[in-house]
Amino acid sequence: EDGGDVAAPVVRSEVVAHRGYSAVAPENTLAAIDEAIRVGASGCEFDVYRCADGTVVLMHDKTVDRTTDGTGRVTELSLERLRQLDAGAWKAARFAGEKVPTLKEALGRLRGTGCQPVIEIKMEGISQQVIDDVRELDMVDQVAVIAFSPQVVREIRELEPQLACAWLYGKSVEGTPAQQADWLQTRAKQCNATILDLNYKLLSPELVAELKQRGLAVWTWTVNEAAVMGALRRWGVDSITTDRPNLLTAAVEP
Ligand code: G3P
Ligand code: CA
C-alpha cells in the first residue's frame, strides 16, 4: 500500500539508552535496563568485563569503586564478591540493593522486549565467551556488539558474522570530510566492521554523507541535548546513544 503524502511520524534514528537509562537509574544495572525498556528505547547499551572466576558482568570502569560500595578491579573480584556489592545506592537511596548483573541476566531482561541489547566489550580476550552467552540465550539475531578495540571487533566478526558489530572511535580525524571518511573506512575494513559508532563531536553532515556513500552505517554517542539529537537525525545517522532516551523517543521530526 502506498502511503502517499500522509504525514507519519518519521523515526530515522534508533535510540539507544547509554548504560541503560542512566540519567534516572544507576548505570549498568537491571534497574537501568528496565527503565530503558519502559521509556521505549530501541536499544540498550551496557559495558562488560570478565570477573575473576570467568563470568561476564556489567561494569563500565576497570574498578568497582565509582559505581558500587566496594573497591578493586572487576577482573580480580569473584562473582560471589561482586554479588555482595551494592550497585545502586550511590545513585539514589531508592536504588539501594541493586546488584552487579551478569551478561546473561541483562540479556534475559531484554529478550523479547524489542529493545536491542548493545554489548560494549571493554576488555580483550572475552569475545568467545560473550558470544557463548548470547548463543545460550538464543539472541544472536537480536544483539549488537561494540568495542573500541579493533582486535575485539575483528574477533567478533570472525567468530559470529551474524552478530551486528560496530567499531567505536572517539578521537578527531584530520582532513576534509572525504579524507576523514577514507581514513575511517580503511580502519573499519581492517577490523571487518560495516558499522562505525563515533563520538558525535567528530561528525558533520558532510562526513555522515561521505560515510553512508561508502556503505557504512553510522551510529553515534553520547548525545544528551535534544537540539543536537535533532541535528544528528537530520544528517541521517542510524543510531543515537543517550543517557536520556526519553528525549529522543519524545522528539518529533521537523
Ligand atoms: O556507546 C558508546 C559509549 O558507551 C562509549 O563510551 O565510556 O560511555 O563506554 P563509554
Ligand atoms: Ca559504553
Image (spheres, rainbow, N blue to C red):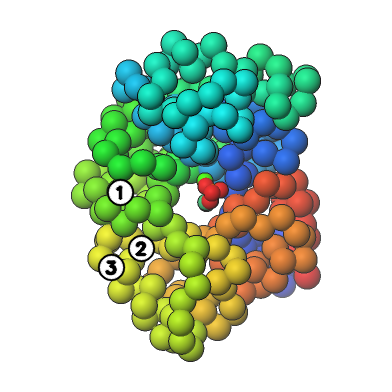
Residue beneath the point at 44% across and 57% down = 168
Mark 1 neighbour density, 10 Å: few (under 14) some (14–19) many (20 or more): many
Look at the image and tell me whether residue 28 can be seen. yes
Up-down: is 215 above or below 103?
Answer: below
Q: Are marks 1 and 2 in contact (CB under 8 Å)?
A: no
Query: Which residue bears the numbered disc 3?
Result: 189
| Picture coordinates of residue 181, whole percent (x, y) | 42, 79
Query: Which residue bears the numbered disc 1?
Result: 152
CA–CA distance in space, label 3 to label 2: 8 Å
Q: Amino acid at mark 3?
A: Lys
| Residue closest to the eye, 252 or 7 | 252
Residue beneath the point at 77% across and 26% down = 92
- Specify the label residue 194 is tagged with: 2
- Left or right, 169 with reference to 32: left
Residue beneath the point at 59% across and 65% down = 200
| Picture coordinates of residue 157, whole percent (x, y) | 27, 51
